[in-house]
Amino acid sequence: MNDWDVEIRPRLALYFAYAAAALILAAHVTVGALLKIGSTGVIFRTADQVAIALLGVVIAGVVLMFARPRLRVGAPGVAVRNLLGDKIIPWSDVVDISFPRGARWARVDLPDDEYIPVMAIQAVDKDRAVDAMDRVRALYDHYKGINSH
């Protein structure tokens, strides 16, 4: 059952994350493969080559975490997924959904001046971010209007 009216993901961050991860992985595998070709005075073994390639896999995996951000909005509330973990915020806890001037990404404002960053709506996405905020604000108005009665 789909409880979400809209799902938003960043655009440019995805391209950057995938490209950077591929480049990092390719560089580490290449360096690992070429490690034994010339003599530098240091003796490299096959385990060293594998270790460098595996280090590239780990670093690429960390970079791919920047492809995780997602925002879902619907009747249950607002579901925010940033780099680490997911959080569902019920409408009763949402004070506002804003994009402060000069900020890199939007945020869900909570009571007591707390907030949760929303990395799914990023300033670098420009018009796409504006459209996303318009859709999110319309749903905010809709659901907060329902919940206030």
Image (cartoon, rainbow, N blue to C red):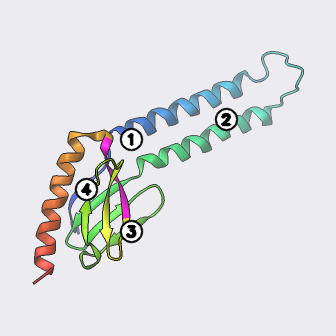
Q: Which residues are magenta?
A: 116-123
Please name the residue shown 27% across and 52% down the image. 8
Pick the quarter of the image with the C terminus: bottom left
| Three-letter code, disc 1 | Ala
| Three-letter code, disc 3 | Lys
Q: Residues within 10 Å of mark 4 (few under 14, many from 20)?
A: some
**Left or right of residue 98: residue 29:** right
Residue 27 among those drawn in magenta:
no
Rendering coords of residue 134 (x, y %): 15, 53
Q: CA distance from mark 1 to mark 4?
A: 16 Å
Pick the quarter of the image with the N terminus: bottom left
| Three-letter code, disc 4 | Glu
**Left or right of residue 108: residue 68:** right
Q: CA distance from mark 3 to mark 2?
A: 34 Å
Task: Pick the residue in front: 17 or 33.
Answer: 17
Q: CA distance from mark 1 to mark 2?
A: 24 Å
